[in-house]
Image: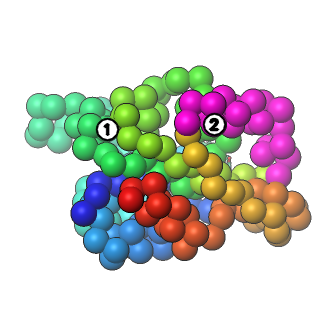
Amino acid sequence: MKTIVVGVTGSIAAYKAADLVSKLTKSGHAVHVTMTAAACAFITPLTLQTLSRHNVVTDPFALTGEWEPGHIALADRADLLLIAPASANTIAALAHGFANNYLTEIALATRAPILIAPAMNGKMWEHPATRENVEKLRARGVQFIGPEAGLLACGYEGIGRLWPVDDIIARAQEMLA
Ligand SMILES: Cc1cc2nc3c(=O)[nH]c(=O)nc-3n(C[C@H](O)[C@H](O)[C@H](O)COP(=O)(O)O)c2cc1C
């Protein structure tokens, strides 16, 4: 059994995280979810908490009854940090080393491999700022899966859709092996 930290960010594709988390949990892994504030506008922490069978952390400053800072403990325990869906904003924060929410704090503190599944409008994905951020992260060894092309929720046709959940899981399993 491996420990997977799943970071969910503020993308319309956040509802697909329910399927992802459910399947990862059923495959026998310990799945710990953290959601950004924006992610909580798209899907409830209750859904992911129930499917992952672990508390979902959304607020890094919430009192938990544990003395140890939760993000460090989780960062140390993680065998993989999987961010799906990953917004343009979170990718930018990671590229620049920001630690302004629970997810980006874990990303800086962990030494586990990181897999990012982006989802966003095609113009956001193709923007030079996002391209640079992705290249910076790739150069640091962060792995990406997707996005794929197709009809986007924003109404555009193009690249930006979250990669199919089953393929994200397969890549995660490969990275854990
Ligand atoms: C309806 C709606 C859909 C959105 N979908 C996306 C998306 O798919 N990808 C993305 O990068 N941002 C999307 N955004 C914008 C993000 O939610 C916003 O940039 C937010 O600050 C991201 O915060 P986070 O990275 O902390 O989750 C969307 C916003 C709205 C209102």
Whether residue 124 appears in this view of the structure is yes
Relative image position of residue 90 (x, y in whole percent)? 58, 38
Whether residue 165 appears in this view of the structure is no
- Residue behind mark 1: 75
Q: Which residue is drawn at 12% across and 38% down?
A: 66
Q: On the picture, is 101 further left or further right than 167?
A: left
Q: Extreme front residue here?
A: 177
Q: Quadrant of the C terminus?
A: bottom left
The residue mark sitting in front, 1 or 2, is 2
Q: In the rendered structure, which segment of residues is drawn in magenta?
A: 122-141
Q: Main secondary structure of the magenta part?
A: helix
Within 10 Å of disc 1 (Cα), the crowding (few <14, some 14-19, many 20+) is many
Relative image position of residue 164 (x, y in whole percent)? 63, 70
Q: On the picture, is 138 further left or further right than 129?
A: left
Q: What element carries label 1?
A: helix
Amino acid found under the numbered disc labelled 1: Ala
Q: Is residue 20 above or below residue 133?
A: below
Disc with the residue nearer the chain's start (1 vs 2): 1
Relative image position of residue 36 (x, y in whole percent)? 48, 44
Residue 103 lies in quadrant: top left
Q: Distance between the residues labelled 1 and 2?
A: 20 Å
- Residue behind mark 2: 138
Q: Does the magenta stretch include residue 92?
A: no
Residue 65 lies in quadrant: top left
